[in-house]
């Protein structure tokens, strides 16, 4: 079974559209409602998704791991993760699935910088810093390490164990890939930025906190 996992926090205006689009390319969609205070869960169910809910907001990393745990319990062999705000194009799910289905990769990362996407400078800077920090703590270079659009094949899905609850989980995934020696593929993808999706991203202050947590965790392991 191929399952899409969508962590979501207060996305009642976007989640139904994302679920409906993703359903065309996977066997089922699971939305992890990360303590939303709006109608995110209700809208997701109405769009045809399964729901797992956190009682309170725990962070993107915690929501992703909850989704991966649930996927394993449901018997999924492959999991696609994507953001709930609509910045990722579900039509590109088959492109990311292909290396897994052809047994050429254990994990596939979308690369928003591999195409001529219009990406604001501040996002390019944040992602560049994230990539460098990820290389520093993992020894692996991933061109878009902080992107939430990924595919976990059977081996990666079985072995992954995330412990970081915030946005730093993206770097932790690369570290898991390095430690378990997963085969990695990167696929250039589109990104659909809008004022809304840009506003939902990390602020400068949160970006600094994320970077510090990545560095601290690297020395504690």
Image: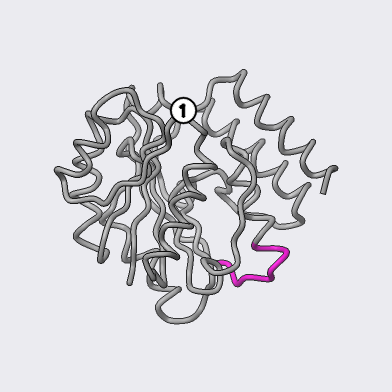
Residues drawn in magenta: 177-184
Q: Give the percent coordinates (x, y) of residue 160.
A: 59, 61
- Seen in the picture, residue 205 relative to 23 is either above or below; the reply is above
**Where is residue 183, by image quadrant?**
bottom right
Quadrant housing the N terminus: bottom left
Could you tell whether 13 is left or right of 211 in the image? left
Counting every numbered tag in the picture gives 1
**Outermost residue to the top:** 205
Could you tell whether 35 is left or right of 89 in the image? right
**Outermost residue to the left:** 46
Instruction: Tell me if residue 31 is in the magenta stretch.
Output: no
Q: Give the percent coordinates (x, y) of residue 24.
A: 19, 60
Residue identified by numbered label 1: 201
Q: Give the percent coordinates (x, y) of residue 137.
A: 77, 48
In depth, the one of 100 and 75 nearer the eye is 75
Instruction: Tell me if residue 182 is in the magenta stretch.
Output: yes
Please tell me whether mark 1 sits on a helix, a strand or a loop: loop
- Seen in the picture, residue 9 relative to 29 is either above or below; the reply is above
Q: Which residue is depicted at the point 60% across and 31% down?
A: 125
Here the colouring is: one colour
Q: Give the percent coordinates (x, y) of residue 69.
A: 48, 57
Q: Which residue is depicted at the point 57% across and 36% down?
A: 167
Within-10-Å neighbours for mark 1: few <14, some 14–19, many 20+: few
In depth, the one of 210 and 65 nearer the eye is 65
**Outermost residue to the front:** 55
């Amino acid at each position: 079974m191929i399952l899409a996992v969508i962590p979501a926090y207060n996305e009642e205006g976007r989640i139904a559209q994302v679920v409906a689009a993703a359903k065309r390319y996977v066997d089922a969609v699971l939305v992890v409602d990360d303590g939303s205070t709006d109608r995110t869960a209700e809208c997701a169910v109405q769009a045809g998704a399964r729901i797992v809910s956190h009682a309170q907001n725990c962070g993107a990393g915690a929501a992703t791991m909850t989704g991966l745990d649930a996927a394993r319990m449901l018997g999924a062999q492959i999991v696609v993760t994507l953001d709930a705000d609509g910045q990722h194009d579900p039509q590109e799910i088959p492109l990311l699935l292909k290396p897994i289905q052809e047994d050429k990769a254990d994990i596939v990362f979308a690369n928003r910088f591999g195409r001529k996407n219009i990406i604001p400078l501040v996002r390019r800077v944040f992602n560049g810093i994230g990539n460098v920090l990820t290389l520093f703590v993992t020894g692996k270079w991933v061109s878009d390490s902080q992107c939430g659009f990924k595919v976990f094949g059977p081996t990666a899905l079985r072995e992954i164990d995330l412990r970081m609850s915030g946005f730093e989980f993206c770097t932790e995934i690369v570290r898991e890939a390095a430690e378990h020696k997963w085969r990695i593929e990167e696929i250039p993808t589109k990104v659909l930025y809008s004022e809304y999706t840009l506003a939902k991203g990390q602020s400068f202050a949160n970006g600094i906190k994320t970077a510090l947590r990545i560095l601290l965790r690297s020395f504690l392991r």
